[in-house]
Image (tube, coloured by chain):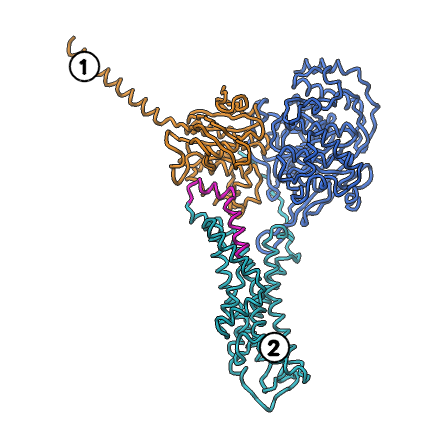
Chain colours: A cyan, B orange, C blue
Amino acid sequence: MMRRTMTVPMENSFVWNRRKTLLVWLIIAVTFLTVVCIAGMYCGEAARATDFSQKNLAPCLAHPFGTDWLGRDMFVRTLRGLSISILIGVSAATFSALMAFLLGVSAATLGKTVDGIITWVIDLIMGVPHLLLLILICVAVGKGLKGVIIGVALTHWTSLTRLIRGEVMQLRESQYIKIAKKLGKSQWHIALKHMIPHLLPQFIVGLVLLFPHAILHESSITFLGFGLSSEQPAIGVILSESMKYLVTGNWWLALFPGIMLVLTVAFFYVAGENLRKLIDPSSAHE
Amino acid sequence: MNQFHIRDCVTDMYVAAMRNSKEMKMDKEKSLLEARNITFQYSKDTRMILKDFSLTVSGEERMGLVAPSGFGKTTFCKILAGYEQPDAGEVLLDGIPLSSYKGYCPVQMIWQHPEQSVNPRLRMSEVLAEGDEVEPRIIEGLGIEADWLNRYPAEISGGEMQRFCIARALGKRTRFLLADEISTMLDLITQSQIWHFLIEEVQKRKIGLLTVSHNDELLKQVCTMICNLEENAETPRCS
Amino acid sequence: MSDKQQEHTHMHKVNSTEGGREDALGYDEGGVHEHSHHHGYARNEHIHGHAAADQVENTYPHEHEHGGYDHQHHGHYHNHHSHKRGETILEIKNMNISFTQYSKGFRQIQLPVIKDLNVTICAGEMVAVVGSSGSGKSLLAHGVMGILPYNATMGGEMYYQGEPLTPKRIKKLRGNEIVMVPQSTSYLDPLMKMGPQIKKGRKDEKTAKKLRTIFKRYSLDESVEQQYPFELSGGMTRRALIATAMLDDPKLVVADEPTPGLHMNVAKRTMDHFRELADMGAGVLLITHDLELALEVADRVVVFYAGTTIEEANAEDFAHVENLRHPYTKALWQAIPQNGFTYVDGVQPYVKDMPRGCPFGPRCSYYTEQCSESIPYQRLRNGYVRCCHAK
């Protein structure tokens, strides 16, 4: 029988560390994005309300972001536009990520022919300049919301698929998976207990990092005129229209929407990067 | 010849018949793991690791396998446990090909590096649960402490992880155990603890044991028979 | 065994003993140490059945080979000269290494993996630090070389050739005077050919010639220079790692588990290379879990348990269990298959479950209340021990 003497605990709880940083950033990011989305949904009318007595006003207390040539309040318009962009970007990216997951797992587990086909498609899509492909798809499907969503969804899955495919292939050769098979465990058990917990963190990080990508692309497409029409004030539309009026000196028409877009994308990106750093074992304990 | 004599004869015959059938039953219970004419190479360009190799292990013996480094001992264990398929030849358990045993494989192998045999994201209790209804007395006998069960593999040392791997392999339906250098990376006291338990356990449950180790003295302490592959690659000389 | 040792004592008595030189730790029996050092070799020779006379020739084992390294030949060329214990090359006092890790939620905790480590290496000797997995011994190599991970902090004192070993100094000496032979072959760059990697990018003729000589000595063909690490076998890669260390005539070699899981004969041959290095004046720090290997090749053995050095003994003390000081060392000795194959219950405690005082306390049959206090590392009979009950 072993004797157990007292143990010596040691803790250091008041130091700032990466996990706390991540939490803070996550809270800020989620709050910002949720507020923008929800507020934007209720601003539909206000975004379209024109008031010709108030046109081309510089930023002031009543109109923090100024007004445009039709007297529409820029702040409300930006908010609405952001929320539309975010919703489109997030839904398209999520769809893309799910596609990536399915294709990645299939490529790794369904044999050489399937793997070959999927890899070939990946190489094909990655070989074409991204924006060009987006434009082509949008034009083919027909411009508008449908075109943008389908375009974004069909072009963002490639790198995530490669990542998942590589991970699953490596996982299948792991000793503990082979041992689990010898211990009589079914494929389902192995997939649920071994593979998914391993893939999930990397998948989520990949997903979060996909959002800013998708949002920016949506804005770009709309800016170029292939996306949403001007009735729906997505950021891209706002920015593209404001281009015509910049010459007249109405700088606020482009600056504020632009900054808001950058902030949105940056928040997503920071959250994703911090998550990745925490998951990566080589920097997990900073 | 009177009736009593006939009765005695009949009784004798009956007793003899019962004894025979019992012996036959015991022979049937005696397991035999057989490797027949195994030929194997990893790919066409690499060397032929095993050529026409045969070996038999019975359920009641503890066999040690000795060969120089790089000979193919681990590869042979992998084939015997069903992790690799031989290019020619077969592995039979009680006369039936090993590949026909679906589900839990009665031939379990314990590997040299426990860190690779365990999923780093699972707690040790889940690792243990993957085994085939491992009895609590095995867990205790191997010195596994209760608060290790909640830990992750990164939080315990190699010696402890190897105990878990051994416990996991000693499930209910295990009939043969292949130990590939399981204590080589462990310290002496842990090695001694683990082997003492294993010897007792395999003796009690009539599990056949095939051990690979480069430590001749250890094999002398543990095994009932030692086979040296070096001299004759096809039929090793055992003593 | 004792009779034969006496026989060899007689044979080696004629060797002159160098005057004892007091070094930093107060070893003033340089002479006695040296004599007992020969004892160790004599014992080794006897185990392998070679008479001392045969080994006087200073040949390298490889010269007897007909190509092909796996040759059953033991080279014992280190026993014929008077072994001089030279200057102190490395001195480590009270080294401690802690890790910062996240525990549940947002808390970070400090895990003191190495609490107190003391070791001294002089020129010409091989010191083995023996500890099981989880004791923290592998961190010692990284600590000396200055390559600890980002979340580790190191304390204590380290002196190299008498001067403190600062991070700046170790960066300068690393790879030249202080080299490490790592355990895993993943330390080699898989995208570089062996030649340029070992020569560390130098292209002058002198280095190239030296490399060729070293390769020849380790039976590595010249073509190995043009190959990539993945094309070599395990044994060749290990020899290549040693060749890398040998290239610059190092003064201190840190070998971190250089022969994992190898047969004793093969491991000994690898260790003979280190022995050769020691004989040329370098100091060798061998870090291993394999006590039997350490006893075969090292001069002194430092036993490491749960983050602390608990005993330092000469290799020949291990011939008789009574000469050992700490109960854990005795338990280790008795667990050797030839020596009884016994065991004591329990396991080495984790960093998080460290008991107060002596880490071996809970498993020790001599445990008293005194053992739960802090125990100093004291001198005892030519060695050191951290135990209240050692005699």
Q: Nearer the viewer, residue B46 or B143?
A: B46
Q: In which quarter of the view is residue C307 placed?
A: top right
The answer to whether residue A208 of the structure is visible from this angle is yes
Q: Chain of mark 1?
A: B
Specify the amino acid type for callout 1.
Arg
Say which residue label 2 marks.
Answer: A239
Q: In which quarter of the view is residue A249 placed?
A: bottom right
Instruction: Specify whether C174 is left or right of C307.
Output: right
Within 10 Å of disc 1 (Cα), the crowding (few <14, some 14-19, many 20+) is few
Both on one chain, marks 1 and 2?
A: no
Within 10 Å of disc 2 (Cα), the crowding (few <14, some 14-19, many 20+) is many
Say which residue label 1 marks.
Answer: B7
Q: Chain of mark 2?
A: A
Which element is circle 2 on?
helix
| Residue A111 pos. (x, y %) | 46, 49
Q: CA distance from mark 1 to mark 2?
A: 113 Å
Instruction: Specify whether A164 is left or right of B60.
Output: right
Which element is circle 1 on?
helix
| Residue B238 pos. (x, y %) | 49, 20
Q: Are marks 1 and 2 in contact (CB under 8 Å)?
A: no
Specify the amino acid type for callout 2.
Leu
Q: Nearer the viewer, mark 1 or mark 2?
A: 2
Boundaries of the magenta span: A160-185
Q: Residue furthest bottom?
A: A53
The answer to whether residue C36 of the structure is visible from this angle is no
